[in-house]
Amino acid sequence: MKKNYQSFIFEDYTFWPQEKKLLLRYSFDGELFFTEEILFDFDFAPDFDKLALGKILHGLFLMCGISYYKAFLPPQIKCKTRGLTKFQAAFFEKIYQNGLAEFFFCNNLPLDPAISFPVDPTKENKALTLPDLEGSLVPLGGGKDSLTTVEILKAQGEAFETWTVGDFPALENMIQKINRPHLQIRRIIDPKLFELNAQGVYNGHVPISSILAFLSMTTAILKKKKNVLFSNESSANEPTIVVNGKSVNHQYSKSLEFEKDFQAYLQTCVSADLQYFSFLRPLSELRIAEIFCQNFFHTYADIFSSCNKNFRQKNTASQLQWCGKCPKCAFVFLIFSPFLERETLISLFGENLFLKSELQKTFRELLGQESQKPFECVGEIREVQAALRLAQKTNQWPELKSWDIPETKFDFRKFSKHAVPRKFEHMISPYIAS
């Protein structure tokens, strides 16, 4: 099913503070309509800034539309709500083009489509001053990265609350262990989209972290928080594959490039008093694994998982699990192998993934020995190579002796480029080396 609609229309959105509900409405040609519902399951600050909220909700409305736009990819985009400035249009054109690169690649579509958001020349960028914000918000992903952020902030005495999108009972034990106030949002995608997917419309990866960026800042404004600290590492900057000079990055919306673009969006269109950044950006995936295994693993061993299958729609499992079959599980097993005892790591996954025949191609992909890395949130090729060489040196993994692991220079403890504010850079700086 590939109907040739001519336009994707941002119809309107409505926010009901008393019901803590936001409705986002979209259509194709005013014929096929969608309504997305977002529920905010927490108490708002009584004096949150309504103008700031309106500004961020408009951006959220435009960002969430990407999930529906991709179904038919019509040539025109129209906005019935407030118009976009030239700056805003350029921002959304860039994230739609780069954030959907994997989607275009996997659907055999051109990687540089003409995506054009309409500009209203009468509109101006007007940021607000929000002087009485305080405290931080930490999105919780269930894996090693956000837990490393949480524990470092706790050790530094930083006031923060945790935050998730979705209702996942398996996170409850972790939330209780962290022992900080927790906020939750529920995002309900129009079921009609899933029905169309089953009928064969275009489907695939969307830059979910860009949607989470807008949702997190919406929460920050409603709670009058100043900082939103994601836990994306420097490794997210590496493309999954480069096609004819065009980077296709599964983690584009986790990259430093997007982070800086979103910071500029907030400063230009919402408020420079709001801070969005990745706390772990200075660190490589391998360094984060080392920090986590040496300091925090045993605190969370029974209740954490980085396997993304835990966060599929309508997952009601009571405990986070490792599927042991996906590239993410293979990658985490690999980067933990230099830093955990053999028995401990095998017990965590329930088996030795290095010996799993169906994962051998995945390991070769991670090592850079196939045509591309897996389309997953995994680290750089060179740090995979570094991790396996470290694991070999522990003499705990004799099965790795026969693996062909290239010698690559990679200082995994070196700080990388980042956009972390000075206050928080000071908190993470002790982890530049062991």
Image (spheres, rainbow, N blue to C red):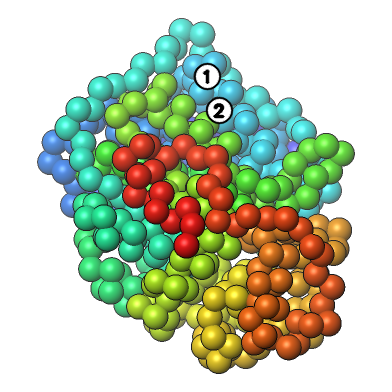
The x, y position of residue 309, in whole percent, is 56, 72
Residues 415 and 326: in front is 415
Other-residue count near label 1 (Cα within 10 Å), few / some / many at <14 / 14–19 / ≥20: some
Residue 91's disc is: 2
Residues 121 and 273: in front is 273
Query: Hey, which quadrant is residue 32 in on the image?
Result: top right
Q: Could you tell me if residue 223 is visible in this image?
A: yes
The x, y position of residue 15, in whole percent, is 30, 40
The amino acid beneath tag 2 is Phe
Residues 406 and 36: in front is 406
Q: Are marks 2 and 1 in contact (CB under 8 Å)?
A: yes
Query: Hey, which quadrant is residue 292 in on the image?
Result: bottom left
Please tell me whether residue 432 is drawn above or below residue 220 in the rendered image. Answer: below
Please tell me whether residue 359 is drawn above or below residue 282 in the rendered image. Answer: below
From the image, tell me which residue sits under label 1: 87
Q: Report, in whole angstroms, how far the alpha carbon at label 2 lies from the one at label 1.
A: 6 Å
Query: In the displayed structure, does residue 370 sit left or right of residue 158?
Result: right
Query: In the displayed structure, does residue 145 sit left or right of residue 29?
Result: left
Q: Could you tell me if residue 139 is visible in this image?
A: no
Point 51% across, 23% down: residue: 88
Point 67% across, 60% down: residue: 383
The residue lying furthest to the top in this view is 122
